[in-house]
Amino acid sequence: MRLRHIPGAEEEIANSLYVIQNPQEHRGKWNQVFGNENPVEIEVGMGKGRFIMELAMRNPQINYIGIERYPSVLLRGLQKRAEVELSNIYFMCMDAKNLGEVFEPGEVSRIYLNFSDPWPKDRHAKRRLTSETFLQVYDQILARDGVVEFKTDNRGLFDYSLESIPAANWRVKQYTYDLHNDPMGQGNVMTEYEEKFSSMGNPIFKLVADR
């Protein structure tokens, strides 16, 4: 993935009150970070942050952490975050493969994956966020009754996910090939990409998985 680098993004992130620095230091103590015992939900690959900030506004009884690997993308989220009054959301700039170093087993109640990079070439399959490689990471941190929710407009990635998830000994609880015209779409919160793609007439695919 090639992204335009924004000069100063790393420095702004390092100085932001909304970004958790050295998140591994909070492993097992996220209740102290938020100051309550509310469940923690995370979005892996939060992009510009519209989705997870909307969830935080709708659900003050849940704590949210948005995770983004690319500083120039996270910076856009920080700009939006500064416009709202919220006490139940933080961000982290990190690679999702290291989530086991940041959360203890069972510390996360729900994981959201939205419009992830499809990595279409077979040799890059392990980089897909619904690959067995990442499902093993999610298994480390997700509560026993926790779920992973995945949305995409990429049919190839979705079909791959419907196969890779059971192959990793997970279960696909629900899925749809047309979220916006399906009961699964009730209460749906759209991402920036989702709004763009659906306005073009592209169907949105969604699945919910557990173990």
Image (cartoon, grey):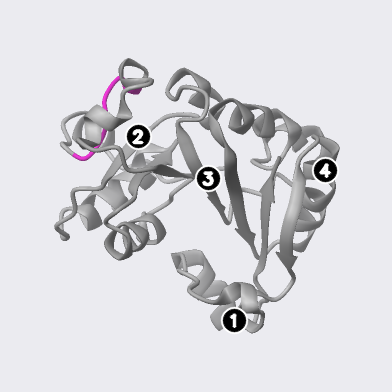
The CA span between labels 3 and 4 is 17 Å
Q: Secondary structure at mark 2?
A: strand
**Mark 2 lies on residue:** 92
Q: Give the numbered dot on residue 166.
A: 4
Circle 4: residue type: Pro
Q: Earlier in the sequence, mark 2 or mark 1?
A: 2
Whether residue 109 is situated above or below residue 158 in the rendered picture: above
The CA span between labels 1 and 4 is 31 Å
Dominant secondary-structure state across the stretch colored magenta: loop
Q: Tell me if label 4 and label 2 are in contact, CB under 8 Å.
A: no
User: Residue 180 falls in which quadrant of the image?
Assistant: bottom right
Q: Position of residue 158 (x, y in %)?
A: 75, 57
- Residue drawn at 60 percent across, 33 percent down: 138
**Mark 3 lies on residue:** 111
- Residue drawn at 75 percent across, 33 percent down: 132
- Residue drawn at 37 percent across, 41 percent down: 5
Q: Circle 1: is it few (<14), some (14-19), or many (20+) Cα within 10 Å?
A: few
Q: Earlier in the sequence, mark 3 or mark 4?
A: 3
